[in-house]
């Protein structure tokens, strides 16, 4: 999980909220639950707080931000790209 070090022992988690078909309305909905939410792209908002996605009608995914990924055994995972950026994904083998 991504950690923002505020003090010696204080750690803040970061969460991304992927907004759905009507992102402006979805962001307004998030603001009612999360006063600290900020919009980082037209389709993505971020917050230090996590809420249950079942409470949200306009959010399609919630992601926890991780600084590092350590794989100790064979794993399968997916990558989602939002915001119209184009990336070249390579087949990774460990």
Image: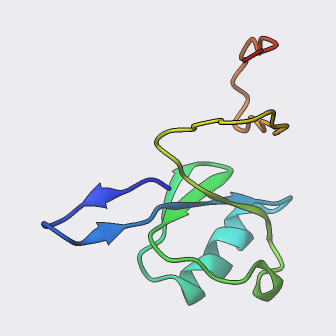
Residue at x 77% of width, y 78% of height: 53
The residue closer to the viewer here, 40 or 3, is 3
Residue at x 72% of width, y 71% of height: 26
The residue closer to the viewer here, 23 or 75, is 75
Q: Position of residue 17 (x, y in %)?
A: 65, 62
Residue at x 82% of width, y 84% of height: 54
Q: Quadrant of the C terminus?
A: top right
Residue 48, located in which quarter of the rendered image? bottom left
Q: Where is residue 69 in the image (x, y as percent from the top left)?
A: 57, 38
Q: How many labels does the image show?
A: 0
Q: Position of residue 70 (x, y in %)?
A: 57, 37
Residue at x 76% of width, y 15% of height: 92
Using residue 36 as the reference point, say whether residue 81 is left or right of it.
right
Q: Is residue 76 above or below residue 22?
A: above
Q: In this view, does 64 lie above or below 77?
A: below
Q: In this view, does 2 lie above or below 52?
A: above
Name the colour scheme: rainbow
Using residue 56 as the reference point, say whether residue 4 is left or right of it.
left
- Residue sitting farthest toward the front: 73
The residue closer to the viewer here, 66 or 58, is 66
Residue 27, located in which quarter of the rendered image? bottom right
Using residue 50 as the reference point, say whether residue 55 is left or right of it.
right
Using residue 30 as the reference point, say whether residue 26 is left or right of it.
right
Residue 89, located in which quarter of the rendered image? top right
Q: Where is residue 59 in the image (x, y as percent from the top left)?
A: 77, 68
Q: In this view, does 86 lie above or below 14?
A: above
- Residue sitting farthest toward the left: 8
């Amino acid at each position: 999980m991504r950690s923002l070090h505020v003090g010696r022992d204080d750690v803040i988690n970061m969460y991304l909220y992927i907004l759905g078909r009507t992102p402006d309305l979805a962001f307004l909905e998030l603001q009612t639950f999360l006063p600290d939410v900020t919009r980082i792209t037209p389709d993505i908002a971020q917050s230090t707080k996590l809420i249950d996605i079942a409470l949200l009608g306009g959010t399609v995914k919630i992601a926890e931000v991780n600084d590092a990924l350590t794989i100790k055994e064979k794993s399968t995972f997916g990558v989602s790209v939002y915001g119209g950026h184009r990336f070249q994904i390579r087949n990774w083998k460990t």
